[in-house]
Structures are given as structure tokens and as C-alpha cells.
Amino acid sequence: MKKEFVVIGLGRFGGSICRELTKLGMSVLAIDKNEDLVNEYSNIVTHAVVGDSTDETILKSLGIRNFDHVIVAIGNDIQASILTTLILKELGVKIVTSKALNDYHEKVLRKIGADQVVHPERDMGKRIAHNLVSSNVLDYLELSDKYSIVEIAVNEAIAGYAIAQLDIRAKYGINIVAIKRHHDIIVSPQATEVIQNGDILIVIGSDTDINRFEIKML
Ligand code: ADP
């Protein structure tokens, strides 16, 4: 289903969101106060307009509350990011995702009603750190401050054994949610499933347990 998005702020982050949403076939209205950026994006997104998002009348005149989802991708101007998020929620926008620069910014955004707060630099830093420690860790998704889902490439230490033989749940406290094998994905694998070289395991668990498992896979 084609959804209608608004992206406010066309810096590196907002710009990348605009491109990807458009590639996914979504309708995107892009807003930035910088005219050059708006011109640059006018050929990429559905509509691009010059405007200051801290000006309530501009947002109202664009009919902002009729859109499905608004992304506040304002970078360094924390004040503008907070004010924009506040106005959007006051105007009744259903889903607002805002980008936070630091933990204090995130706390305020949540307090004033942002439905989702993203922290791309911090999250990407975490992902990259896990990948630096172990080249087997391909991706890392934080579920909360204690739990994550991680994609781990299988090494010789566990290839050739059935899940039950490895006793991963009892030994490490983590669960294998799925196994990626060539172009297939085995969701909720049986305990009898034999892990093969080249498999990618998608595991869920607490960070401490996952870290112990990552170290075994070094
Ligand atoms: P990034 O780290 O994603 O590159 P930037 O801070 O460089 O972030 O970019 C943020 C964008 O948001 C800039 O293009 C800036 O013009 C835009 N912006 C900042 N404040 C407002 C505002 N009040 N209204 C509209 N656009 C804004």
C-alpha cells in the first residue's frame, strides 16, 4: 500500500530517508528551509517545498495532519527539532519519528510525544563496534537497552552440529530465531536442524548472553 510520508530536513540523514522511501514506491513530501536543497530534491521526491517547520501556519497550510507519517530529520538545531515535533503532535499527526542528537534530546522528544526516536550515529556506532570485535557479527538490532537481535555468520566451532547438540539455549540463554542458508530462510528451526558452514544465524537474547556467544564465535 502506498503510504504518504513527510520528511523535514534534507541533510545527509533526511536525504537518505527520502531516496529510500521513494525507491520503495512511497509518496514523499520533503520540507527544508534551504532552497538549494529543496531544488536538488524536487526531482527525486513527489513534492519538495521550502519552509521553516517551526512555523505552525506553514505546516497547517501543507495539510500536514493528513499524512501517514512525518519524519523530523533536523540535525544540529535541537531547538528546531523539539519545536517541530511538538507542533506536529499538537496538530494531530498520527506518527512522528524524530532524530535525536544525544540522550537528553531523546528524552525531551519522547516527553513531548514523539512516537519513535531514532539515534542513527549512536546505533550505527554500536553496530560497527560489534562488527569490529567479531567479523562474524553481520548486523545488530537493539530491541531495548538489554535485549538485541544479532545476525552471526557460522564458523567451524559450531558447523556440522544440530541445534540440540550445541545446546545453545541452555548454555548461552539465547534463541535462534531463524537461519539464513543461501537464498532460503528457515524460520523457527527445529532442534534437529544441523547448522552448516556458510549459514547465518539470527539470534535473540540479552546483550550479556549474546556477547558470550559472539566471543565463542571469534
Ligand atoms: P544531517 O546530520 O542529517 O546532515 P543537518 O543538520 O546537516 O543534518 O541537516 C538538517 C537539515 O534540516 C538542513 O538541511 C537544514 O536546512 C534543515 N532544517 C533545520 N532546521 C529547519 C527548520 N526549522 N525547518 C526546515 N528545515 C530545517
Image (tube, grey):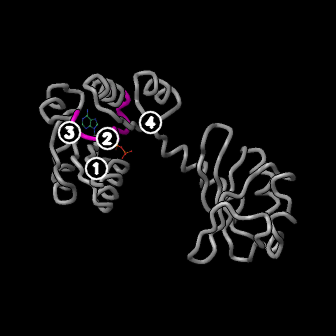
Secondary structure category for the residue under label 1: loop
Residue at numbered disc 3: 33
Circles 2 and 3 in contact, beta carbons < 8 Å: no
User: Which of the two discs, 2 and 3, labels the residue nearer the N terminus?
Assistant: 3
- Total numbered badges shown on the rendered structure: 4
Q: Is residue 72 magenta?
A: yes
Residue 35 vs residue 106, the one in the foreground: 106
Q: Sort mark 1 into few (<14), some (14-19) or many (20+) by Cα contacts within 10 Å.
A: few
Q: Sort mark 2 into few (<14), some (14-19) or many (20+) by Cα contacts within 10 Å.
A: some
Identify residue type, mark 2: His
Secondary structure category for the residue under label 4: strand
Residue at numbered disc 1: 3
Residue at numbered disc 4: 116
Within the image, what quadrant is residue 65 found in?
A: top left
Image x and y of residue 190, in percent? 74, 64
User: Which of the two discs, 1 and 4, labels the residue nearer the N terminus?
Assistant: 1
Any part of residue 84 in sight: yes
Residue at numbered disc 2: 69
User: Which of the two discs, 2 and 1, labels the residue nearer the N terminus?
Assistant: 1
In the rendered structure, the answer to whether residue 24 lies left or right of residue 181 reads left
Q: Is residue 14 magenta?
A: no
Q: Nearer the viewer, mark 2 or mark 1?
A: 1
Secondary structure category for the residue under label 2: strand
Q: Nearer the viewer, mark 4 or mark 3?
A: 4
The region drawn magenta spans 65-79
In the rendered structure, the answer to whether residue 192 lies left or right of residue 28 reads right
Circles 2 and 1 in contact, beta carbons < 8 Å: yes
Q: Is mark 4 within 8 Å of ligand 1?
A: no
The span from disc 4 to disc 3 (Cα, nearest Å) is 23 Å
Identify residue type, mark 1: Lys
User: Which of the two discs, 3 and 1, labels the residue nearer the N terminus?
Assistant: 1
Image region (quadrant) for ligand 1: top left
